[in-house]
Image: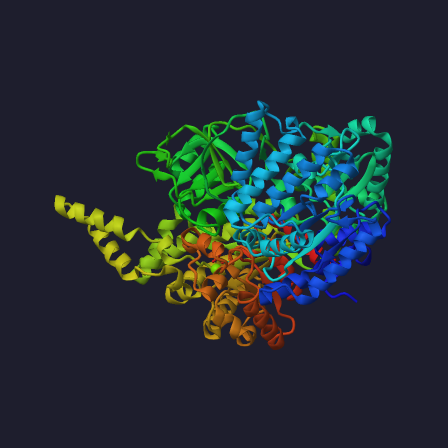
């Protein structure tokens, strides 16, 4: 049994690891009896052996000899023959397709002798010499590494000498002369003759394809697509068939359904008298398959039949490359075809309706990322000349067009006047929230995908582009300047694309999303409003698949929501609870001063006064939230701001005091404030006095919040509601911290129960967002009724990466040099952070069997991470309301 070489008739479609995608599918088509030109596949194992040793395994040479002889016998032709030469193509074919990344050499086997044989065989001398010059050119570039421009220049010269512009106008004599010129280029550039021996050509071409696995561009592509480097490629050696043998020949691509929109019916392009690369190069206008039916009805009928056969066999949309050689159809390639997001949903449901797949399979054929694409309005595809200002990091998808504004107050004011605005900031902070809500989109010059702007914008489903480092944003001058020197002033219209990260000048038309309409307002409204049947079909397909996901999934889906408004939206999008209410967001705006007073107070009375003022406000917040979430778990997290977010800026305050001192008009309150801010100032606020630490150090702050929750629950009970509030303690590192808070909570809940005459006994749990918390989860579980993994902070503290800085700063380099394949803030780092999650789950459940486990970091809405959370046995994921449908879908996919 051959070790490294498999004949096409030996494999099948499930052997992609060994034969690569192309080889496995060629084998499958051969098995199906479809007309595949005979050939063989050199396995990925040979490539791996070659990568290991740097040498072609000696057995491979022997096996190639056997396979070539077998091919020659089967076809009755010989490589390099004078009369009836066999020619072969040598193509790469990895497990995962890497379009355009790797090498191909066609027409291997032609030399000075066999070119005559090919002329004889084909009856076309011009064709034979054209094939030969293509071989020298392709071989020169791919195998010998010669600059392709040298060949292109020679071709141009030949045409100029003839006074023609098209390749086809060169005759056999011209092409014969061109072959000589090309051979001279090979001699000059590589210091060797173009190899005449066909076997030498074949061996060198095989090595070139094997080498192309390791090129920089291939590595880069794999990193981007997250394809492992050690898979290796297969090499397919296939007897050549020719689409360029005159008007009864041609080559084309076909799809069994429209991969653009999922429309039924076949779809494709055909080019008469051409070879594969001519179609891709787009040098001539192609015909449709309907035209092919006119040109060659018999070949068309055979193609249709093959397509149907393939679709039935693969039970999915297939794409196909084919060639017709003098009226005879040959299938050169097939695979399950790539498709757009709308096509994915529609086709999955079509196949269910045709009883070709089950609903479970339909669910596995769409992704959360595709659903997310469908949720956003998009820029209309065509018609407009766009002026690109810059390209930055896409942080929250969608298309937003509005007037540029440079501060949140103007954003709010203009929005109130009915204007669409895009808020442009160097970076955002919690004070920008009002402006972000008012704006249709947010653009920042600094920050990464988990910067404040990005997280908040995603939470709101607001289009957002971050880290546009090329823009100089000047909030005082109310301008931004591009690298090219174009100044955009306040009020000028800009358009930002949160899917591509592009920023345009001027208006770009936007189309709203019918799928989002469905998700928010229900099927009837969306179907009613759909402009055409195709949109209706798409909405229905999303509905069917999402419903199936809901009945299939094990994980519950909660939402991160801080206000009654967010919560309402989250519920309409299918959230089954609130997994994280970040209460610090309730302390912004005018309440911020009260918090500032609580934190900075130097006497108990001043502090108590501020706390008393906050209590009714917080109680109302929670009562509203619990009313919206009636009957569903609502996890309220005690305040967790890095301290600096609530205190006046030290520099600004220092300057103010210094200037006032110069004028001799110092306000004593400012001096006291400055001293307090100095005292509390932290070099590293993210690792400073925040979370439970703040609650334990500032008297009364957590008490106030716990009391507000307890009183809100009592109020809801009195109103006949079914509140399910839970109290969550942030940034816990030690069980002692949790014990202290829990004791306070027990006391306060008992007080409220006595005061209100109802029983308020709320679960108390904690976030796991520090490595120490994960490692001591068994201890924490003695005090916690639930855990919620704060994977943002857990990633920050496990890697030691500042979540606010690193993405913009150096992640692009870390991705380029392969340290990271994706930001660990986006997709959970299963190896490191994930291990801590596993440990905490295990130790937590050992100590308390009925411990409820969830995740509320950004990863809770990330498709790949959701799979991990399902596998590790969490009870729920919690994500921004907008991502709830994505999480529902992905949780369903994880379960099938
Ligand atoms: C977290 O750290 O993952 C989390 C949810 O908390 P925050 O993002 O508010 O720090
Ligand atoms: Mg956190």
128 vs 664, left or right, is right
Q: Position of residue 667 (x, y in %)?
A: 19, 48
Question: Splitting the image into 4 quarters, where does residue 373 fall?
Answer: top right
Give me the residue at 79% from left, 47% from top. Answer: 37
Figure quadrant of the C terminus: bottom right
Is residue 26 something one can see in this rendering? yes
Q: Is residue 573 shown to the viewer in this render? A: no
The residue positioned farthest toward the top in the image shown: 163
Of residue 698 and residue 203, the one placed in the foreground of this image is 203
Relative vertical location of residue 119 with respect to residue 143 in this rendering, above or below: above
Q: Classify residue 17 by image quadrant.
A: bottom right
Q: Position of residue 745 (x, y in %)?
A: 50, 67
Q: Which residue is at 35% across, 50% downward?
A: 593
Camera-nearest residue between 394 and 173: 173
Q: Which x, y percent locates residue 859?
A: 56, 56
Instruction: Determine whether, in the image, residue 693 is placed left or right of residue 714.
Output: left
Residue 737 percent location from the top left of the image: 45, 71
Decide: is 730 above or below 175. Answer: below
* Quadrant into which the N terminus falls: bottom right
Q: Is residue 850 above or below residue 295?
A: below
């Amino acid at each position: 049994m051959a070790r490294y070489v498999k004949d096409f008739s030996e494999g099948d479609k499930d052997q992609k690891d060994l034969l690569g995608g192309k080889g496995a599918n060629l084998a499958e088509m051969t098995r199906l009896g479809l007309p595949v030109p005979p050939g063989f596949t050199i396995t990925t194992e040979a490539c791996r052996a070659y990568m290991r040793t740097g040498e072609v395994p000696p057995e491979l040479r022997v096996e190639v000899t056997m396979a070539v002889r077998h091919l020659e016998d089967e076809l009755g032709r010989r490589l390099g023959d004078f009369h009836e030469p066999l020619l072969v193509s040598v193509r790469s074919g990895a497990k995962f397709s890497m379009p355009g990344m790797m090498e191909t050499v066609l027409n291997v086997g032609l030399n000075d002798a066999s070119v005559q044989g090919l002329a004889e065989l084909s009856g076309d001398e011009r064709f034979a010499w054209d094939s030969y010059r293509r071989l020298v050119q392709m071989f020169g570039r791919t195998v010998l590494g010669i600059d392709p421009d040298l060949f292109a220049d020679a071709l141009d010269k030949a045409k100029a000498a003839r006074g023609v512009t098209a390749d086809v106008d060169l005759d056999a004599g011209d092409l014969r002369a061109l072959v000589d010129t090309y051979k001279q280029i090979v001699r000059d550039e590589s210091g060797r003759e173009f190899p005449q021996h066909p076997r030498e050509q074949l061996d060198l071409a095989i090595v070139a394809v094997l080498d192309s696995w390791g090129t920089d561009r291939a590595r880069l592509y794999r990193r981007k697509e997250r394809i492992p480097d050690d898979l290796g490629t297969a090499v397919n050696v296939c007897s050549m068939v020719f689409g360029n043998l005159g008007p009864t020949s041609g080559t084309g691509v076909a799809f069994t359904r429209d991969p653009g929109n999922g429309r039924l019916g076949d779809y494709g392009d055909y080019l008469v008298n051409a070879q594969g690369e001519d179609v891709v190069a787009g040098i001539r206008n192609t015909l449709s398959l309907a035209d092919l039916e006119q040109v060659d009805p018999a070949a068309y009928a055979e193609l249709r039949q093959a397509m149907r056969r393939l679709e039935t066999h693969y039970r999915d949309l297939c794409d196909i490359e084919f060639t017709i050689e003098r009226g005879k159809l040959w299938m050169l390639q097939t695979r399950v075809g790539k498709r757009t997001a709308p096509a994915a949903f529609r086709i999955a449901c079509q196949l269910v309706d045709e009883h070709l797949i089950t609903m479970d399979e339909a669910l596995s054929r769409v992704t959360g990322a595709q659903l997310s694409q469908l949720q956003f309005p998009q820029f209309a595809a065509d018609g407009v000349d766009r002026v690109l200002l810059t390209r930055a990091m896409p942080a929250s998808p969608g298309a937003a067009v509005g007037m540029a504004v440079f501060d949140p107050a103007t954003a709010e004011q203009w929005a109130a006047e009915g204007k669409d605005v895009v808020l442009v900031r160097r970076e955002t902070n919690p004070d920008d929230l009002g402006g972000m809500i008012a704006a249709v989109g947010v653009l920042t010059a600094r920050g990464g995908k988990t910067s404040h702007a990005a997280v908040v914008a995603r939470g709101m489903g607001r289009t957002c582009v971050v880290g546009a480092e090329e823009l100089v944003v000047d909030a005082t001058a109310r301008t931004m300047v591009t690298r090219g020197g174009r100044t955009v002033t306040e009020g000028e219209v800009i358009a930002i694309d949160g899917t591509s990260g592009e920023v345009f000048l001027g208006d770009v038309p936007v189309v709203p999303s019918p799928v989002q309409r469905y998700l928010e307002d229900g099927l009837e409204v969306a179907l009613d409003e759909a402009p055409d049947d195709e949109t209706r079909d798409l909405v229905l397909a999303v509905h069917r698949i999402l419903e199936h996901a809901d009945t299939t999934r094990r994980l519950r889906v909660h939402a991160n929501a801080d206000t009654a408004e967010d919560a309402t939206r989250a519920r309409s999008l299918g959230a089954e609870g609130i997994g994280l209410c970040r209460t610090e967001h309730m302390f912004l705006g005018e309440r911020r001063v009260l918090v500032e007073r609580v934190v900075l107070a130097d006497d108990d009375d001043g502090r108590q006064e501020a706390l008393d003022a906050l209590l009714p406000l917080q109680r109302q917040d929670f009562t509203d939230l619990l009313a919206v979430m009636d009957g569903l778990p609502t996890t309220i997290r005690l305040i967790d701001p890095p301290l600096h977010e609530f205190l006046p800026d030290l520099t600004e305050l220092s300057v103010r005091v210094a200037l006032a001192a110069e004028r001799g008009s110092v306000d004593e309150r400012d001096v006291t404030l400055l001293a307090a801010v100095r005292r509390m100032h932290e070099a590293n606020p993210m690792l400073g006095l925040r979370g439970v630490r703040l609650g334990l150090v500032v008297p009364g702050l957590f008490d106030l919040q716990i009391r507000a929750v307890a009183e809100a629950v009592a109020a809801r009970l009195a109103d006949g509601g079914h509140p399910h509030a839970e109290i969550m303690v942030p940034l816990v590192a030690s069980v002692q911290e949790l014990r202290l808070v829990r004791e306070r909570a027990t006391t306060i809940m008992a007080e409220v129960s006595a005061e209100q005459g109802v029983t308020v006994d709320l679960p108390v749990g904690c976030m796991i967002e520090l490595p120490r918390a994960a490692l001591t989860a068994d201890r924490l579980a003695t005090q916690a009724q639930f855990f919620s993994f704060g994977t943002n902070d857990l990633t920050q503290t496990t890697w030691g990466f500042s979540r606010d800085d690193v993405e913009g700063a150096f992640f692009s380099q870390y991705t380029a040099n392969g340290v990271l394949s994706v930001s660990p803030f986006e997709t959970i780092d299963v190896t490191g952070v994930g291990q801590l999650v596993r440990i905490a789950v295990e130790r937590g459940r050992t100590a308390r069997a009925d411990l409820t486990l969830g995740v509320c970091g950004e990863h809770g809405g990330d498709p790949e991470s959701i799979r991990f959370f399902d596998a590790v046995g969490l009870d729920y994921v919690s994500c921004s309301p907008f991502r709830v449908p994505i999480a529902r879908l992905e949780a369903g996919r994880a379960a099938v």
